[in-house]
Image (spheres, rainbow, N blue to C red):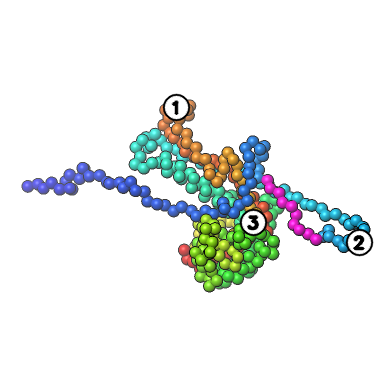
Amino acid sequence: MATNTSSTLSNQYQNFFSKKLLSYAVEALVLDQFGEKAPLPAKAGHKAITMFRYGSPSTAAIENLVEGDAPSGTRSLTLSKIEKALTQRGQVVKLTDILTATDLFNSLQQSIKTCGEDAALDLDTITRNVLVGSNAAGDAKENGDGSALDNSDTLTEMYADGGTDYTTFEATTSGNTLDAGAILDAVTKLKVNRANPVSGGHYVCVTSPQVLSDIMKINEWLNAAQYSNVGELYKGEVGSLYGAKFVMTTNPFISGIANAEDDDRFDYDNSGGGGLGTGKDVHASLFLGQQAYGVPDLGTQSPFSPKVIITDEADKSDPLNQVTNVGFKTFWSTLRLNPNHYIVMRSKTASVA
């Protein structure tokens, strides 16, 4: 006699879908906190961010005075104009009417969230690459190929081993992690360059989790939880050492070596992985003082709260209203205000992550 089982009547069964969405990795982006924001009003008649700086203090025109006689000379002022053209950035997500009418999850809501997260990552990456000297694409040299940096800038670069040559540094297998001595050297260099601290008498170092792993093993390390004024923490701040507050980013600039050239430090390449040997990743940590770099704040297309545009009406290109477009646009660039007020510190990491 036949026995009816779940196998013989299997067509009645269907997969069960849980509506609980799994979380996904979101970048820790922090560079927006430290840029000098320059308002760019609508209809200003300019498509570039422009800032100005006067010359540094000097005693060259100061002289001994003779009683009753006017000084023989006068102090001349210098004013430098620095500028960089802005670029419009944006993307679009297309959703069909069938999808939005039948999807198990809210694809429209997720599209809005995704656009915001993508915009933040894109603009943080542009800022990071400008500070390090790479181009906006993240995989080519800005000045390593012979072309000049914006406004004839010269980067302030240091290496954790105290050297000055990238190729030599990349080939070393010890002494190239960001240790207490290298941190103190970076802070000292900022002081020598007369860079004012970002806030509260502290400079800021933006670095990767891998480099932080090395630093937090230093005996002098002070965890953020030990501060007396915890309410003043920066987004992503984890601790301090030698007058520098350390802020973690998961979007660091990483370089490797391909042709045994110093120019490779401008190429984004994270294929080497962690470790201290030749060919391993070289992380660029950014030690920042005040007014190291500037970013625009365009009222109508602010990058700090990018406007997500939803187009869900019929037009000539979509007469039956079969597609909904979700997208964002912003007008953005990053300008190095004073390369002496920040340091690109390169190091390897003992972390194998």
Q: Position of residue 264 (x, y in %)?
A: 60, 59
CA–CA distance in space, label 2 to label 3: 40 Å
Which of 342 and 10 lies nearest the eye of the viewer?
Answer: 342
What amino acid type should be assigned to the residue bearing mark 2?
Val
What amino acid type should be assigned to the residue bearing mark 3?
Gln
* Residue at the farthest right position: 68
Name the N-terminal-most of marks 2 and 1.
Answer: 2
Element assignment for label 2: loop
Which of the two discs, 2 and 1, sits closer to the camera? 2
- Say whether residue 55 is magenta: yes
Which of 118 and 147 lies nearest the eye of the viewer?
Answer: 118
Q: Give me the residue at 35% from left, 40% from top.
A: 103
* Disc 2 residue crowd, few under 14, some 14–19, many 20+, Cα 10 Å: few
**Residue 25 seen in render:** yes
Residue, disc 1: 319
Q: Is residue 255 above or below residue 302?
A: below
Q: Give me the residue at 49% from left, 45% from top.
A: 116
Q: Give me the residue at 52% from left, 46% from top.
A: 119
* Disc 3 residue crowd, few under 14, some 14–19, many 20+, Cα 10 Å: some
* Disc 1 residue crowd, few under 14, some 14–19, many 20+, Cα 10 Å: few
Which of 212 and 258 lies nearest the eye of the viewer?
Answer: 212
Element assignment for label 1: loop
Magenta stretch? 50-59
Q: Which mark is residue 290?
A: 3
Name the N-terminal-most of marks 1 and 3.
Answer: 3
